[in-house]
Image: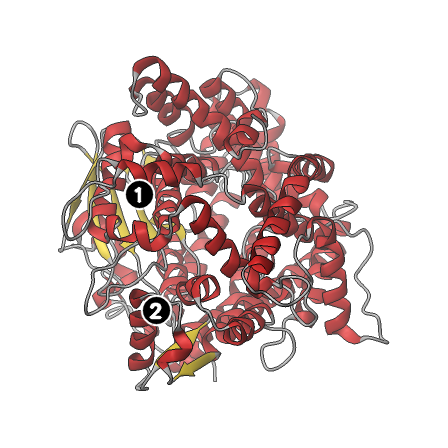
Amino acid sequence: MAIATTLAATAATNPFFDYKNWKTPHGTYPFNEIHAEHYMPAFDEAFKQGLQDIDDIVNNPAAPTFENTIEAYEKSGELLTVVAGCFYNLTSAETNDTLQQIEMELSPKLSEYSSTIRLNEKLFQRIKAVYDQRDKLKLNKAQMKLLEDIYESFANNGANLSPEDKQTYRELTAKLSQLTLQYGQNVLKATNAWTMLITDEALLAGLNDDTKGMLRANAENKGLEGWLLNLKPTTTIPVMQDLDNRDIRRELYMANTSKCIGGEFDNTAIIVEIVNTRLALAKLFGKKTYADKSLYKTMAETPENVYNLLNQLRDAYMPAARAEVQEVEDYAHAHGFYAAHIQPWDFGYYSKKLKQEKYAISDDDLRPYFELEAVKQGVFGLAKRLYGITFKENKNIQVYHPEVTAYEVFDEKDKFLAVYYADFHPRDGKRGGAWMNDFQPQYMVGKKDHRPHIVNVMNFTRPTAEKPALFTYDEVRTFLHEFGHGLHGMLTRCQYSAQSGTNVPRDFVELPSQFNENFIDEKEFLDTFAKHYKTGESLPQELLDKMHASQTYHAAYSCARQLSFGYLDMAWHSMEQPFEVNETIGTIESVLRFSDSAMEQVQVLPTVAGTQMCTAFTHIFSGGYAAGYYSYKWSELLDADAFAVFKAAQKKNGSIFDKQAAKRFRQNILEKGGTEKAMDLYKRFRGGEPTIDALLERDGIKK
């Protein structure tokens, strides 16, 4: 029986139907009143209202204008924005079986709703009528960009197709929606399904007390005695780097890298269907590959430009990457490793030991200086020093889980700027990784500025009974990264929600986040918050020097790893013909061999039979990065080039917190959203196009 009928809710009791009258601070979601049974009725009503908005535009007797067609379209479907803003944030950060079931039922409805609008011929004709006279209209840059984007979004989603092809488009998009959803749910279920209970503490030799405390808490939460390993990054990273027991490391590695390869949560057949469906969509629009269709609105623009970047980085980094792996292997052999070559489950372990020996520094040395509350104040303080904004916790703002903290954000004149939610620790209902999203986008209605509600969701080390939450150096970097996305969302000042915040090309969206990471390497910044959680002592200069010396450690290896993901993504999405399964070896082996081949040119560790990341590569198969994973490296190039402005100012003025550079970055990057072409915005900030030089210098590849 459909959830829409089994989880009935009336207008009188459904909080979504009264969203304009919420009495919460800044109109934030009343999470305490929202329950699973409210979603489907709210979505159904939102679809109804959204389609009515479209009918009102289509049936307007007045001639099409920018205001009565383009702006009206941009503002349509308000209730759907509200309901989806809550639901899809929770299905990532606080899901359960009921929400996942709703998500499955909702997927085809949402696809049908979108297709109904996109394929509405009368609507498109009105949009086209405005577009055709665009040169005669007195539009500003943002309005012209909105008009062009809306027209192109329709044209590239079937509006110019024949009636027969439009029906095919509907069927393909509905199918793709279901496939990508199933893929992502399989990854989450497979991740949660695997555990390993250790009952002999001697097997945990090499792990520090914090990690063992976390593993014991994992077991206690399941009602078990001992130490429980799982496939969440907070477990896999320290175990793969620190655990002496090679057999357990191997078992954990195999479990983590064989997720969704065969078995109950198999994703191999789904991958084939996803890529072939995407290719069919591309062919429908006359494109050779899905990558050609996907890249037209990015900074890269074409698959050739993407491959040019990947190949340029490959040629620059691979010699150093091979040398780094060889150095680790030589070190392992010198310390009793008996096999001819190290394996992937050995590399992290011996790499960390070599790093400790070369630089005498480890996560355990730094953790005491990165206590959660201090880190938050440091990251918030960075935003204040650069942009003048402040954060004040507000316990009256309801949250979707008790661990979430809500803040009001104020600008340099103490004017309300945004709501910010911070969600730091892993839970079973939260997917892995870290991300930023909005609950409410920023937009203007007349002169009224509706400020955004932003959330950062992360999976950082939990506190234990003995210690507060102490971050690793990489966790601090990740927080800075996601907070950079958050600043992009919080500082935006745009007329239209479709252009505000992170609504920019995907190979531009990582610039603010990766730019923000650079500050962790600056002593001036670290001195503002990195103090020992017990003694209050600042992070010693000796540790800072060692940390800085170690920054380029395995930069080439890390680049090769990222390039392998980029090549894998492009291989799956640059095919000109449908992927055909080799019937002799079957679907699983066909998918694994193709993926291994795609990554081969930048592989620096042995390939292990029966493992592959493609079956759990949610970025490209259930996220928004299909034919777009290269954008992480593209953005690294941009962020290194952008931060060079601050480094130059530091040399001149003595401070990395350069107000003038920050002002230009805020005005041209963080506030502008997608109101102009990304390259134009970047060149206005930087004074020219970016080059790869600053990245090579930062990584120690080029002196």
Residue in front for this viewpoint, 59 or 226: 226
Tag 1: Cα neighbours inside 10 Å, few (<14), some, or many (≥20)? many
Label annotation for residue 638? none
Name the residue tied to disc 1.
452
Tag 1–tag 2 contact (CB < 8 Å): no
Residue 215 position within the rendered picture, expressed as x and y whole percent measured from the top left:
34, 73
Residue 629 position within the rendered picture, expressed as x and y whole percent measured from the top left:
59, 47
Tag 2: Cα neighbours inside 10 Å, few (<14), some, or many (≥20)? few
Q: Amino acid at mark 2?
A: Arg
Say which quadrant the C terminus sits in. top right
Residue in front for this viewpoint, 53 or 214: 214
Does residue 39 appear to the left or right of 178 in the view shown? left
Q: What residue appears at the point 56 percent right and 47 percent down from the top-left corner? A: 558
- State which quadrant residue 343 falls in: bottom right
Residue 571 position within the rendered picture, expressed as x and y whole percent measured from the top left:
73, 52
Q: What residue appears at the point 79 percent right and 75 percent down from the top-left corner? A: 586
Q: Secondary structure at mark 2?
A: loop
Residue at the right extreme, as displayed? 584
- State which quadrant residue 167 falls in: bottom right
Label annotation for residue 427? 2
Q: What residue appears at the point 26 percent right and 47 percent down from the top-left corner? A: 420
Residue at the top extreme, as displayed? 652
